[in-house]
Amino acid sequence: MTGSILTMKYLLPQNFSTQKLLSFLKGAEKQQVKLLPEAAVKPALQLPVPRTPFDVYRKEKLINLLNLRQLAEYRSVLEIGCGIGDLLKEIAKYNPKELYGVDSSEKMVTYAREFLKEEKVDVQAANVFRLPFPEKSFDLVVVMDEFQYILDNKQVERLVYEVCRVARQWVILVEETAPEETRKEQFICRTIERYKSEMKKKNFHLRKVDILDIAATSYVYTSRRNPWHWIRWVFSPLLYLLGFPSSVMKMPTNEEEVPDSALAMKLQALTLPLATSLDGVFRKVEGTTVMRFERDQLFRRG
């Protein structure tokens, strides 16, 4: 995707404001919206909400890794666990032959239909473990941030079975991975090898892996351990006298906070090119991972 990282892009229709979306997301988090069985909880949005220049950079880099033009253009596509449909809206830009989305939350499907009313897409509520489609219905099946919220390994196998059953050729999985399986608060970072093994059982083979390479920028702009937050707090009285808002005097917390002033946004925009140049130096070995799988082909097996 091209475009300036300083331009705030939102995947929203004109009558759906960013403030309204963020307000909805906060409400959804409070209600602990269940998008999968077994009390699995995940955000309603698949792509990050671009509120800062870093957010825009991160979102565009992730979309580039999905390589949607090559895999989705003029093909039939299904997204499993589509939330309110923001990734479907992005896929629609590449003129798929057919575009479908399913989610196990009726409420999310209602929002998705409103969100996507200008697009040629069919969204419906369905049990992701019993998809209402025949075998090999779609050229491409996309699953983003679903497996990591399923803690039961048997259910992981069931979902892998359904994903592979309805996929004719390609499957894209986007999940948080780590060198060793790691359980966090409400999700699991499994290994790439684990996904590779499970998919291979269904004759789908790993063709390409990309880890979202934002080690330097995420450390600078979002890390809870970033020493710059403490330096800012030490010099906060001086910054306050220079015109920064009073919030600059707050001690660093464990919560990621959006810059709360136009000046802070401009400073982030100015420093972003330097930070992004370091992303290629400090490689990540865990985090958001895009895995592309292909079904067995006659002359290219394994």
Image: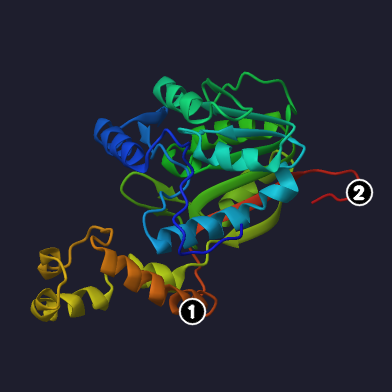
Who is closer to the viewer here, 245 or 78? 245
Label 1 Cα crowd, 10 Å radius (few <14 / some 14-19 / many 20+):
some
User: Is 119 placed above or below 284 here?
Assistant: above
In the displayed structure, does residue 285 sit left or right of residue 38?
A: right
Does residue 216 appear anywhere in the picture?
yes
Q: Residue at x 19, y 77 (%)?
A: 232
User: Is 193 placed above or below 200 here?
Assistant: below
User: Is 122 placed above or below 286 here?
Assistant: above
In the displayed structure, does residue 209 sit left or right of residue 191?
A: right
Q: Residue at x 27, y 69 (%)?
A: 263
Q: Residue at x 28, y 38 (%)?
A: 23
Residue 86's x, y, as percent?
Answer: 50, 39
Residue type at mark 2 is: Phe
User: Is 49 placed above or below 220 here?
Assistant: above
Residue 36's x, y, as percent?
Answer: 43, 30
Rendered image quadrant of residue 207: bottom right
| Label 2 to label 1: alpha-carbon separation | 41 Å
Query: Do the residues under discs 2 and 1 have CB atoms within 8 angstroms?
Result: no
Q: Earlier in the sequence, mark 2 or mark 1?
A: 1
Does residue 180 appear anywhere in the picture?
no
Residue type at mark 1 is: Leu
Q: Regarding mark 1 in the picture, which secondary structure is present there? A: helix
In this rendering, which labeled residue sits more in front, label 2 or label 1?
Answer: 1
Q: Which residue is mark 1?
A: 278
Q: Which residue is mark 2?
A: 299
Q: Regarding mark 2 in the picture, which secondary structure is present there? A: loop
Residue 131's x, y, as percent?
Answer: 60, 22
Label 2 Cα crowd, 10 Å radius (few <14 / some 14-19 / many 20+):
few
